[in-house]
Amino acid sequence: MKWLKISLIPLVLSAQFAFAEVAVIVHPSNAAAIDQAEITRLFTGRGATFASGSKATPINQAESAAVRGDFDSKVLGKSSSQMKAYWSKLVFTGKGTPPKEVADDAAVKAAVAADATAIGYIDASKVDGTVKVIGKF
């Protein structure tokens, strides 16, 4: 029985991470109302402005970041490999440039806090007063 309890610990811990929430964030001064379709439009290069007409600068996390995989699947509805192929095609044909990429949650938070046009995503547990949450997924 003891070995069963011990063997379940990794399962419980991994399940906790599998259900982590992704928070989409903007600069605190950004008053734009943004829904999931708008976020998808911005992060797939189909738009460069918020619905209000102001410029939008999407910030992506590194491919190795777990939250990026969660964002790609939960918000964009694609796997990370599908998004990589999507951007490769657009770049190759000259029809798009992928979002700026930074290393981790802290780098996204710093970039968004410093730029009123920025939009990014981080693990919801990392949100603080330097950014404004516009959606959780």
Image: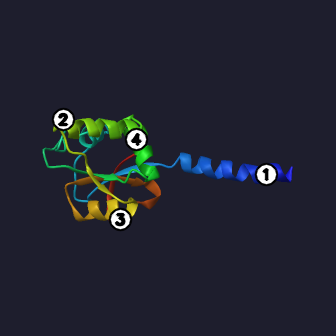
Q: Amino acid at mark 1?
A: Lys
Q: Are marks 3 and 1 in contact (CB under 8 Å)?
A: no
Image quadrant occupied by the C terminus: top left
Badge 4 or badge 2: first in the primary sequence: 4
Which residue reaches farthest front?
92
Residue 89: x %, y % from top left: 25, 35
Q: Which mark is residue 129?
A: 3
Residue 68 in picture, x, y percent from top left: 40, 48
Secondary-structure class at tag 3:
loop
Which residue is tagged 4? 80
Q: Is residue 72 above or below residue 30?
A: above
Q: CA distance from mark 1 to mark 4?
A: 34 Å
The first of marks 1 and 4 along the sequence is 1
The earlier-in-sequence mark between 2 and 3 is 2
Q: Is residue 136 left or right of residue 132?
A: right
Q: Say if mark 2 contacts mark 3, CB within 8 Å.
A: no
Rendered position, 102 above or below 47: below
Q: Is residue 46 visible?
A: no
Q: Quadrant of residue 52?
A: top left
Whole-angstrom CA distance, mark 1 to mark 2, is 54 Å
Closer to us: mark 4 or mark 2? 2
**Mark 1 falls on what kind of element?**
helix
Labels 4 and 3: the sequence-earlier one: 4
Q: Amino acid at mark 2?
A: Thr
Label annotation for residue 93: 2
Q: Nearer the viewer, residue 33 or 103?
A: 103
Of 125 and 105, nearer the camera is 105
Q: Amino acid at mark 4?
A: Ser
Circle 2 packing at 10 Å, graded few (<14), some (14-19), many (20+), is: few
CA gap, disc 4 and disc 3: 29 Å
Name the amino acid, label 3: Gly
The label number, if any, that marks residue 5 in the structure image: 1
